[in-house]
Amino acid sequence: MKIDLEISEPVNFGSGDHQYLVQKAAVKGGSSKVDHPFTYSSRDTPQEAIKYPHSKHRDAANTYAVQISEDVITNEGSMAAPSPFEDVSIRRGFIVKVFIVLSVQLLITIAVVSVFLFCEPVRNWVISVPWFMFSLFPAVMVVIIVLACCRDIRRQVPANYILLALFTLLEGLLLGSMSVTFKADEILWAAGATTVVTLALTLFALQTKWDFTMLNGVLFVLLVVLMIYGIIAIVIRSYWVHLVYALLGTLIFSMYLVMDVQMMVGGRYHYEVDPEEYIFAALNIYVDIINLFIFILDLIVR
């Protein structure tokens, strides 16, 4: 069926400021006027229709009256919701809360590792019971998966604090059981180096204009490569293979630390952590610091 449309003036359908809705109404009978014109607005507010006359000589069965209504799109619907970090007080309170939680985690970890390191009976017991360290791995993985994947749980008080305290205690026990195979001075040197590196990277993350949050996907790929390389390093007993593995691990988790600090600070970065996710932010930075400590300790021992 051929449709003839007559428009008395040009209409710009490519305009970005307006949306035109074209409706076709079949004219029944011989009348050439539309008695009840109507329009449609996305906001359900009828507007005055612009009516265009059609020729009376057309066939009524194949003649359509076209009416175009103008629906102005306001900026209210297209504007994104403001970021919670735009409020300076919210951002400052969030950062303080993250650092308080992180400091408590590190203090608990240091206390637990010190017991394993300087208490001789505990040290001898862990050496005589090697399954203790390996039994901690699944428990640590289960708790961290719950905290990372269950958003409602890590936002619910006091469940989030209980799980975070449990994870910190398990991580401290795991590090303590690992530390019995090293000398005390090696542990202290690694802890001091980790402290210096963490402070330096934190200051760098706060001062640099580079946005490391854009490297989230790249760092995940590098982490997968590091895990595969670690499996190869277990099979191949070579000094240089293990040295490269320790260097790569230190570099990757240094970049992760910078990225997580920038995501915590928010504001001018591409990605940022929600102010309600202070447990998640503290967990990320804590895991970065612990992994940095492990790889730096491996470098010192090598």
Image (cartoon, grey):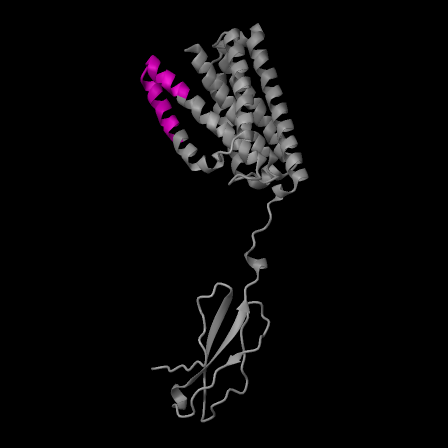
295 inside magenta stretch: no
**Image quarter in which the N terminus is found:** bottom left
In this rendering, position of residue 159 left or right of residue 226 = right
Residue 69's x, y, as percent? 52, 74
Residue 254 vs residue 135, the one in the foreground = 254
Compared to residue 178, the image places residue 80 above or below, namely below
Q: Main secondary structure of the magenta part?
A: helix
Q: Could you tell me which residue is drawn at 54 percent across and 15 percent down?
A: 191
Viewer can see residue 99 = yes
Residue 148 vs residue 293, the one in the foreground = 293
Which quadrant holds residue 298? top left
Compared to residue 237, the image places residue 26 above or below, namely below
Compared to residue 204, the image places residue 45 above or below, namely below
Which quadrant holds residue 48? bottom right
Q: Could you tell me which residue is drawn at 49 percent across and 12 percent down?
A: 129
Q: Which residues are magenta?
A: 224-247
Residue 286's x, y, as percent? 55, 26
